[in-house]
Amino acid sequence: MEGLLTLWHDTGIYHFEWKQLVMMAVGAVLLYLAIVRKFEPLLLLPIGFGAILANIPNAGLNDEGGLLYYVYHIGIDSGVFPLLIFMGVGAMTDFGALIANPKMLFLGAAAQFGIFATLFGAIALNVIPGFEFTLQDASAIAIIGGADGPTAIFLASKLAPHLLGAIAVAAYSYMALVPLIQPPIMKALTTKEERAIKMEQLRPVSKREKILFPLLVLGACIMLLPAATPLVGMFCLGNLMRESGVVDRLSHAAQSEIINAVTIFLGLAVGSKLSAEYFLTLETLGILVLGAVAFAIGTGSGVIMAKIMSRMSGGKINPLLGAAGVSAVPMAARVVNKVGLEANPQNFLLMHAMGPNVAGVLGSAVAAGVLLALVG
Amino acid sequence: MEGLLTLWHDTGIYHFEWKQLVMMAVGAVLLYLAIVRKFEPLLLLPIGFGAILANIPNAGLNDEGGLLYYVYHIGIDSGVFPLLIFMGVGAMTDFGALIANPKMLFLGAAAQFGIFATLFGAIALNVIPGFEFTLQDASAIAIIGGADGPTAIFLASKLAPHLLGAIAVAAYSYMALVPLIQPPIMKALTTKEERAIKMEQLRPVSKREKILFPLLVLGACIMLLPAATPLVGMFCLGNLMRESGVVDRLSHAAQSEIINAVTIFLGLAVGSKLSAEYFLTLETLGILVLGAVAFAIGTGSGVIMAKIMSRMSGGKINPLLGAAGVSAVPMAARVVNKVGLEANPQNFLLMHAMGPNVAGVLGSAVAAGVLLALVG
Amino acid sequence: MEGLLTLWHDTGIYHFEWKQLVMMAVGAVLLYLAIVRKFEPLLLLPIGFGAILANIPNAGLNDEGGLLYYVYHIGIDSGVFPLLIFMGVGAMTDFGALIANPKMLFLGAAAQFGIFATLFGAIALNVIPGFEFTLQDASAIAIIGGADGPTAIFLASKLAPHLLGAIAVAAYSYMALVPLIQPPIMKALTTKEERAIKMEQLRPVSKREKILFPLLVLGACIMLLPAATPLVGMFCLGNLMRESGVVDRLSHAAQSEIINAVTIFLGLAVGSKLSAEYFLTLETLGILVLGAVAFAIGTGSGVIMAKIMSRMSGGKINPLLGAAGVSAVPMAARVVNKVGLEANPQNFLLMHAMGPNVAGVLGSAVAAGVLLALVG
Amino acid sequence: MDITALLLEAGNLMLVGMISVFLFLGLLVIVVQTMAKYCPADIPAAAKKPAAQPTNNTLNPKLIAAITSAVQQYRDNK
Amino acid sequence: MDITALLLEAGNLMLVGMISVFLFLGLLVIVVQTMAKYCPADIPAAAKKPAAQPTNNTLNPKLIAAITSAVQQYRDNK
Amino acid sequence: MDITALLLEAGNLMLVGMISVFLFLGLLVIVVQTMAKYCPADIPAAAKKPAAQPTNNTLNPKLIAAITSAVQQYRDNK
Ligand code: NA
Ligand code: NA
Ligand code: NA
């Protein structure tokens, strides 16, 4: 019966260390948030499950030859998975509202201040003993303020892979928390009259404009910021497939089969980075705090920019729209709509908020490109 | 015209060896079974086709750089394909019947005696000159008794890759033969009165129970048998995606796009292992015999366990249910239903048989984990 | 503000060389052809986009670790992508018309003269200073005359990877130009009376014949031309999955999910070969000219063969059908139908033209096998 | 390893394996039974559903009946 | 690198980053506005569509009538 | 290799290639014709099908499209 003893010496019970238990609890919390609270379940469910699998003692899923090892190295280390997700998101995105009102791009730009201010904050945290963020670390953390999951994962995999798990978890968690984080900031920075401003109906956008738009974005990116072309390029490819109308099979594949399959594996791979060694550290605490700060600053700077534009336009722009500039598509736009309706039950801002919302996606991809070019 | 001569020297006719012809005939037989007899066509068709492709002289599909080489090494050597199939199967499995009547798990356990008895039998075969099965070989062969294709492929790829082709073919063939193999054994071991026993209707199972079930299975596996977590973990991930109801896109991808694509490549890769060198051996004969024995013993031990439980419960359990414990989902459950109806035309056992049927999947994954831990 | 300077030194504007701009213009032209002119958009859109991405200075998408690098090496260098496309095409092809009238295979054979004559022409071009095509190069170029994209990509990746971009672009462009290239040749070689010949209705083909056909084709290929089995084998696998009727899930996956995803990546990978270094050469000009010649000769030889067969059959075969032998499924068949209708408004040739059309696919795969065996 | 030793080992594996499988699945039986005690039935949810369905699923039985009759009409007219 | 230098660099990054983002997206504003000038609206296409649809979609008018009446029936009954 | 030799080789390839292609596809012609002799027609199956279809397929795709659009219409109107 030595076999039973061997088995006993192999059991998880025999091998558990408390840190692994804590990490599996973290995974369980993520599953809870995904399933019961419905926080970004498409990502948090596989991430949470991956976190549990990665921390099983003696199972070796994370070791060379294990499933999670393959998924991480093939999909994330190479940068392929976030790029495929970006292609799919591009194929799902309708830029109509932004093309009709291109000034909304300024709101998407302003909201990126959340990223760069947080970068400064992360470095400032180094004065506290125990924190030793490099510029690379700080940049990867700051991108959480971009409120865009695949961008955060892509940048973190390039600049600070050891922080990837915490960064991805923070990014998706805060994106899910947008309806809680944003409204108080939006209300604090605007008056009720401002929030009640109704906006003119958007002009219809022609098919040709929609086809040209991704090509122009790609052109600008090529000329000004080649470092952002992997992200922006795949996003534009997806959008071009969508809008061209001649490759519906491919567009459908990008926004359905490919993105679904990749999402499962991306989630598992991110989860595999939630090991005790990297996650149960003071840095993680810092990342969680800085991520929340980044979201708040991004929301605030977007709203302030929108206030300025509102004044300049003679009150034709509702400053709430600025909050949608952080991206977190389409949650942030819905929050804008909701807060707008509270101020004026006839004030439907959803379509208008889609403009800054998708501008925020471009904005954070550009910010990621800048960071890659300067500290990568 | 030397070109024609070169071509002639390249032709299959010029190069054929009789062994390759025999293996291509084996492939043709598998295609026949798949297409005409409809024996597990989803697997046997690609396996049969792969067997033909792998044995073409001078085509090099199996050599480094050839398609089958890539498919085998990327998908099976790494263990990835069987795990993805398992995720898909998890996403297709409804554990409701088992949760409603958890004692059926004992039937899934008892039927695994087919595996362990066959392991003993395979070693015993070594007394016959010509057979030299190691413990690893014997374990990989015995898992055929688990009546679960991906589990058999996963274990064989880890313990005895040289036997993989024969093991996979035996496993899927016998799974298809369940309606022929099982009924005589079931009838021999039960009386007509026993077969006519009607069972109480199953209680409805709550959504929460269905969500918690895969997590509890994973938890038990983590604590007791980490070696089984790749298989059980992916199975539970698929099931959790299904039952959670918050990631329908991913659940659909797992049980449709991913599993379909993987099935084609898994089949081809298994077929690529049907080369003369490994298949036209005495061992293959042994494997085919042992596989049939494993199925028969598993069926028998399941029925005997069900008889014991039937007695203990005062005749409330139909002993036929034990036969479903070998898994072979959903064929074995259907066979139980059919044999039950023969004894009593009002006796619908299908739903009740789904319990031991899915229990058998867990049972053989656990058995695979035990074998991996002890002889891997 | 040195950061801004660094960024400036990173910009595309700072780094552009005129050759890259030309190649991006080539990419833009391909996008134009795909989107506005609807020339084979499924391939030319991703190829054009890939060409733009590959030529961005300082973005490194084509360098080791870049997305296009991975896609090319994993998918094309290995030969996997064209083979998967071929499997999908097989699953989409109905051989009914060809089985009903197997003599049409001779038309598919005759049209391959476009390939072999062009091979000779490519070598003859070497008398012009500046051209130095090897036999490998010439073979890869000549396959354009096969009017079959995946075959051309597969052969070029094996024989002349440095010409792959130009060859693939030429192949798909001319396939899209079939409605312009073929009619004048067809009309020049036939009289109005010949074009007006009506054909007898095709006999119905039994399910069993359709199932056996791919197996017989594979059998012939194994015996006579093993070098063609990767292409022909995957094609036959796809077709067998379609016609067997027992694996509809897999057939659907092959002709939908798998082929769509692969098409995107195949296009990007081909586009990545459209770099200035390889494309802005005299050879490319030669390839474009030779490709057009190959199409024209193939069309002509098909029509002449059909004329001969028409005479021999006593005028029961419409010689236009020969033009469909180049493949370019289903465009060439549609062109035949259109030209036939011009001569006789009651003359519907579409179904009859599908026979030589799919025969042309087999013919060019066979030709590719011959070239692989003799110069590979 | 000679065959007797191998057979002994195989017998040992058989014993250990069956014990493990029964322990594992037996533990699951207890766990699932325990879970059932603490999980309320879905009855309220089931009662809620019919009311909630029309907003989600919108196919009201009356509508289905109407469409079925339309389809019938269409077939008859064909 | 000591913390003051790092902070300086971070501040520099903040400045450069925000300038770049605004330059980039500002350029896009101009580009999109310019594009709008040269792109005719889709109005003719929109007018064409209703006429073109029946050929593409081939919904038998009888069937549409039948279904419309079914839906009408359903509404009236509601 | 000088150009004459290359041209000779190319000519040879042309000949060998066309012969092979014709041999291969010619063989297929014979094979398919032979197959046709031994394969009974599907007539019984074809006769069965129209009767079997309604149970398997029952909903004409056009009809499904029509119903989907009707339901959509109904929803939009709601
Ligand atoms: Na953003
Ligand atoms: Na089993
Ligand atoms: Na061809």
Image (tube, coloured by chain):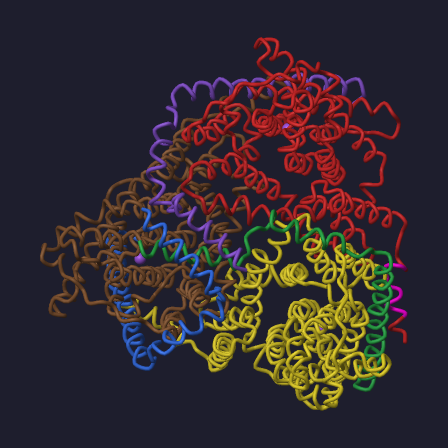
Chain colours: A brown, B red, C yellow, D purple, E blue, F green
Q: Quadrant of ligand 3?
A: bottom right
Q: Residue at x 63, y 76 (%)?
A: C175
Q: With C239 as the anchor, is C221 left or right in this view? A: right
Residue C210, image quadrant? bottom right
Above or below for B217 versus A277: above
Q: For residue B10: magenta?
A: yes
- Residue B324 x/y as whole percent: 64, 25
- Residue B12 x/y as whole percent: 86, 59
- Residue C8 x/y as whole percent: 34, 72
Q: Residue at x 14, y 70 (%)?
A: A313
- Residue A260 x/y as whole percent: 48, 50
Q: With A225 as the anchor, is B134 left or right in this view? A: right
The N terminus of chain C appears in which quarter of the rendering? bottom left
Residue C43, image quadrant? bottom right
Q: For residue B116: magenta?
A: no
Q: With B29 as the anchor, is B320 left or right in this view? A: left
Q: Residues in magenta?
A: B5-13
Q: Residue at x 62, y 33 (%)?
A: B330
